[in-house]
Amino acid sequence: MVTDTGIGRVLLVKTSSLGDLVHLLPALTEAAAEHPDLRFDWLVEEAFAEIPAWHPAVATVIPVSFRRWRREPVAVWRDGRWARFVERLRSHDYELVIDAQGLLKSAFLASRARGRRAGPDFASAREPLAALAYGRRLPVPPELHAITRMRCLLGSALGHVPDFDHWPGYGLDARLASLRAEHGNGDDRVLLLHGTSWTNKHWPEPYWIDLARRLRARGLVPSLPWGSEAERERAERIATAADGGVLPRSDLASLFRAIVLARGLVGVDSGLVHLAAATDTPGVALYGPTDPARTGVVGGRITSLAAELGCAPCLRRVCRTGEPPVIDRDSGSALEPPCMGGLAPARVERLLLERMEMPRVAEVS
C-alpha cells in the first residue's frame, strides 16, 4: 500500500517481448501520475532496453541477457557475468519489486533483487508456479485486455484504483514531438510490417504484393522492414513485385523513427504493430489466430481488423482448422491460414485510407 509520501524506489520486472513491454507503458504512465514521489527502475532484456528508457518515469534501466545466457549457463557462471548482473541488481534496496510478467524466469529474476515482491496470483500468472515467488499475490482477471491487466496489477500493487474512463497514454509524447520537430511531417512511405514470430499470424504474401501495388497506384511508397533472413527475402520479393522499398536492417530506435514519420502502416500482430500504437501514425493491424479483445492495438490512429472465420481467434501457433483455404485468383494457390486469407487487400486498403484520411478517388482493381 502506498503512503501519502510514496514508497520510494520500485523495480518493474518485464523483460520481453516487445509487445508486452509496450502494454506496460500506460500502466506506468498512470502509476507515475498517481504517485509522483515514486522512482521506477525497470529490469528488461538487453534487446529491448530502449523501450523503458523512452518513458520519462523510468529512472534506471537494468538490462539482462537472460535469453542469450541460457544458451551457455556454465560459461556465464564461470566468467562472472551472472555475478556482476546480480551485484548491480542488488545495489539498491527496493520498497517493492513488481513482476509484471508472471513467468518462472521473471519470478526468478525478481527474486534476485532486494525488496518485497508482488506479482499475479496463481490464477492470473501466465505460469502459475511463478506466484510462489511473491509475498503479495494479486488477482488480475485473465480475460481482460493486456493493457488493462497491467493497469490493474500496478494499481493493486501500489494502492491506487485505475481510472478506466481516462486513457493515460504511453508516455512517449515528448519523444514523438522531438522526432517530428527534427524530421518534419514525414514522407509518403507506408510501412508494411509483415514479420511475426508465429507462422499462423502471417498474412499471405500475394496479399502483401496486391496491397503494395494498390498503394503505389495512389502515389504512396510501400516500404518493408525486416529482422531475419527469411523476412529480408520476403520483403525483397514484395518490393520487387510492387516497385516498393526494402529498409536496411535497423535497431529499435531507427524502426521507431520510421514508424513515427511514415504516412501510414499495415501490419500483422507483432511487437512493431503494438509499438506503432504508441505513436499517432495511422494504420491497420491484422488479426487472425490472436484475439484483439485481449491483445489488440490501443490508442493512436491504428485500428484492429479481425478475421471473421468461425474458428478465429484460436490462439494457436499452428493452424488446425478444418475450414477450406482461400484460393488466390491469380495463382490458384491456397492462401494459408484460412482466417488471414479472409482479410482481402481491397478491404485492408479501404480501412487504411480511412485512417489516413485520404480520399479514395477511385477503387484500384
Image (cartoon, rainbow, N blue to C red):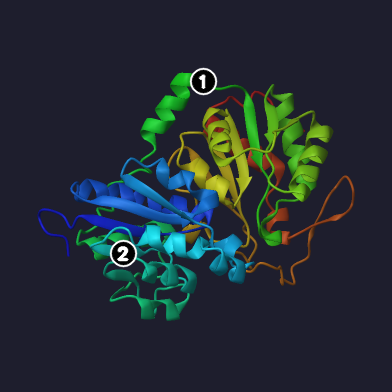
Examine the rendering and report whether any part of residue 361 can be seen: yes
Tell which residue pokes out farthest to the right in this image. 331
Q: Front-most of 32 and 114?
A: 114
Q: Dot 1 corresponds to which residue? A: 183
- The span from disc 1 to disc 2 (Cα, nearest Å) is 39 Å
Circle 2: is it few (<14), some (14-19), or many (20+) Cα within 10 Å?
Answer: many
Circle 1: is it few (<14), some (14-19), or many (20+) Cα within 10 Å?
Answer: few
Q: Front-most of 327 and 265?
A: 265
Point out residue 344 in the picture as x, y percentages from the top left corner. Answer: 70, 46
Quadrant where the N terminus sits is: bottom left
Q: Front-most of 273 and 294?
A: 273
The residue under the point 47% across, 61% down is 294
Point out residue 106 in the picture as x, y percentages from the top left corner. Answer: 45, 67
Using residue 155 as the reference point, say whether residue 101 is left or right of it: right
Using residue 161 as the reference point, say whether residue 193 is left or right of it: right
The first of marks 1 and 2 along the sequence is 2
Using residue 145 as the reference point, say whether residue 364 is left or right of it: right
Residue 15 versus residue 183 in the image, above or below: below
Residue type at numbered disc 2? Val
The residue under the point 23% across, 61% down is 158
* Residue 233, label in figure: none
Residue type at numbered disc 1? His
* Residue 97, label in figure: 2
Quadrant of res 234: top right
The residue under the point 60% across, 36% down is 265
Residue 262 versus residue 127 in the image, above or below: above
Q: Front-most of 293 and 183?
A: 183
Residue 62 versus residue 138 in the image, above or below: above
Does dot 2 land on a helix, a strand or a loop? strand
The residue under the point 20% across, 55% down is 8
